Amino acid sequence: MLLFRSEEDIKDWCREQGMPLGQVLTLEQVWQLSQSWYGSRLEAEYTGRTAVEAEKIFRQVGLADPFWLFD
Amino acid sequence: MITDIDLAVRHFVYRFFVQETRPPAVAETAAEFGLSLPETEAIYKKLHDGHFLFLEPGQSQIRMANPFSAVSTGFIVRTGAKSYYANCAWDMLGIPAMLHEDATISARFTGPGGVMRMAVKNGRIQDGQGLVHFPLPVRHWYDDLIHT
């Protein structure tokens, strides 16, 4: 996931790569996502997560677009 | 099927990475657990296939233990006296989130704009600029992780 100065720069990059625009998140959104996604990664009890658990994290952070679904 | 020893190796890899700012080599993990090199390589491969970490293509060397990168990137995270490379703009925030520590971050913009510097302090981000682009829907994230 790359960092850009602006949405315009993202659109220019997508055009250069021949890719459609994906999802654009603010740093605050990524920080909220990171805390849920990575907060327990160092624990010995961490055993990975299922697609259902991952989708729940995305929803909790406000990411409800079909982009964030595994199916 | 992932077993207790596989998860113990996963945990060791992460603890080693936190301490040494690099992943353990196969020989280092083998020594820690009293395993042979082929046994350890097989565990690394299982963890790779289960997306617990990611190996260099065709090799037993760890490339990523997300959010850590084993190779230099444009995303540098400093916590205390240690400095880590993150894999991407998500992982640059994943490192302080995982460590539960304050951090300073130096991140290269794609396209024009140079380098962005920000911090995480007392659980909040400070001075950050820019936007993070997730190019692929989640169902395609593991198609080609290095280029996502």
Image: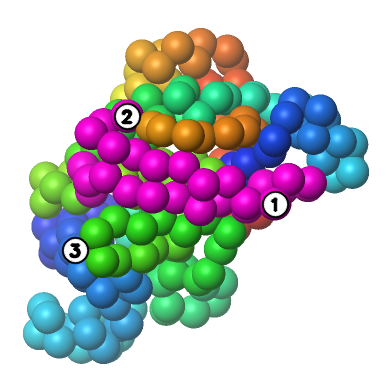
Place residue B83 in its image quadrant: bottom left
- As helix, strand or loop, the secondary structure at mark 3 comes to helix
Spatial CA distance of label 2 from label 3 is 24 Å
Q: Which of marks 2 and 3 is nearer the N terminus?
A: 3
What type is the residue that disc 2 sits on?
Answer: Arg
Q: Mark 1 points at which residue?
A: B114
Q: Does A67 lie within the magenta span? A: no
Find the distance from the CA under tag 1 to the CA under tag 3.
Answer: 32 Å
Q: How crowded is mark 1: few (under 14 residues within 10 Å), some or many (20 or more)?
A: few
Q: Residue at x 73, y 45 (%)?
A: B113
Which three-letter amino acid code belongs to the residue tagged 1? Gly
Q: Few, some or many C-alpha atoms within 10 Å of disc 3 (few <14, some 14-19, many ≥20)?
A: some
> Percent position (x, y) of residue B30?
19, 83
Q: What stretch is highlighted in magenta?
A: B99-124
Comparing A48 with B129, the one in front is B129
Query: Which residue bears the numbered disc 2?
Result: B124
Q: In this view, does B111 lie to the left or right of B70?
A: right
- Residue B104, given in percent of the width and then of the height, sits at 38, 50
Q: Where is residue B20 in the image (x, y as percent from the top left)?
A: 26, 74
> Which residue is identified by label 3?
B15
Element type where label 1 sits in the image: loop
Of the numbered discs 1 and 3, the one sitting upstream in the chain is 3
Q: Do labels 2 and 1 share a chain?
A: yes
Q: Residue B104 in magenta?
A: yes
Q: Which chain does the numbered disc 2 sit on?
A: B
Q: Where is residue B77 in the image (x, y as percent from the top left)?
A: 40, 55
Q: Nearer the viewer, mark 1 or mark 3?
A: 1
Q: What residue type is labelled 3?
A: Arg
